[in-house]
Image (tube, helix red, strand yellow):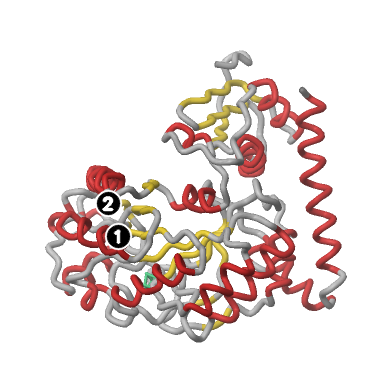
Amino acid sequence: MTSLSASAIREILEEKSRLRELLSSQLSESEKKSAERDYHAKRPPRPCGITVHTAIGCVYQCRYCYIYDMGFKIEVKPYPLRGLQLAYALLSNKYFIPGSRGTYLAIGSISEPFHPAVVNKTLEYIEAFYRYLNNPVQFSTKAYLSSQVCEKLANISSKRISPLVTVVSLSESASLEPYAPKPEKRFETIRNLREAGLKPFLFLRPVIPGLTEKEYEEIIDLAVEHGAIGVVAGTLRVTRRILSELREAGLDVSVINRRLKIPVEKMRSNVQYDVYTSDIKSQVANYARRKGLVFFPSACMANLYTHNTSCWKMVHMNVELSVKPREVDFEVVESIVKQLGGEASKVIFNRGELLVYTSSKVDSRLISEVLRSYFLACVRVTRSKGNGGRLE
Ligand code: SF4
């Protein structure tokens, strides 16, 4: 087992260094230096992958958006790196794993990647990712994507890229998303993506209590009509500022406040708080499935889905695709942790989630990412006092 995990880790490192050399030969010294200093070369992935920025800032000013609390401005600028540099930056990131089971890439979390000012940059990045890295790539958008752009996306990704098209509300879109393209244009985007041979998902995010319940059926019906193949629903996260924006937009925020874990008065400024929406998401899931759509509670599953891959959580949802997750063997888990300098004191695998307790000081984010990629399971690595090395 040790040799199996050792060779898996060696293969990852060799492939990563081969690709890095390849890109290094195509970049100037100063281009390499700026890529190595870049955010994408440092940031550890979250369980859903690394968010890739093709732009900085956003002009759409959606009133539920948290990027303005994070310091981003109401402007849109293309990200300064070239596509090759961005791929090189990722390969310089110690946590990044290249390849089809590697780190998931998500574009569009802090900007609109298909705003006219940055659409070419986004396409350039996506092309570089599929040409050199081959990782699963996903984007989320509120833009109108023409047939030509959709065809280009299909070509450069061999029809694998995962598109999420965001529609939050029909009746309140003008007040909640005053500068974003209208929902009708986004449904046209869904149609164009599907006609180009891609698999667009409706991104119902954020689910806004008090509003989504009234509208999700109509939104899903329209998504079906325009060719969406699935739905991903996402949680609302609020700050004090977002709550007052929503109030100003005319929403009854008391419904939201009741779903927060702490009283509004105790919310700290600039901190994002999750709003409980699981019950609404269940209703959305049931309706989407009744309409013949696939439903996923998280975006990364839709990313894997269009790349014909299923993780353990998807298997538990009866979604099994050509690339399947590996059987979770605790000896291999133990061995991978050991190869990465730690010791597993307890391992639990339950409903697609792998929990690893280590008794030593380790780089838990690196271990998580290697285990996630190897087994295609959600992984949490936690430091514990241990229980005598017993595995469960
Ligand atoms: S389009 Fe996205 S990034 Fe831009 S303001 Fe709206 S939610 Fe924020």
Tell which quarter ligand 1 is in.
bottom left
Residue drawn 50% across and 62% down? 198
> As rendered, which of 24 and 147 lies closer to the eye?
147
In the figure, residue 32 lies in which quadrant?
A: bottom right
For numbered disc 2, what is the local secondary structure?
Answer: loop
In the figure, residue 209 lies in which quadrant?
A: bottom left
Using the image, tell me which numbered label, if any, was put on residue 238: 1
Using the image, tell me which numbered label, if any, was put on residue 275: 2
> As rendered, which of 135 and 250 lies closer to the eye?
135
Q: Are marks 1 and 2 in contact (CB under 8 Å)?
A: yes
For numbered disc 1, what is the local secondary structure?
Answer: strand
Badge 2 density bin: few <14, some 14–19, many ≥20, Cα 10 Å: many
Residue drawn 28% across and 49% down? 291
Above or below, 51 against 73 in this view is above
> As rendered, which of 340 and 60 lies closer to the eye?
60
Give me the C-alpha separation between circle 1 and circle 2: 7 Å
Residue drawn 53% across and 76% down? 55
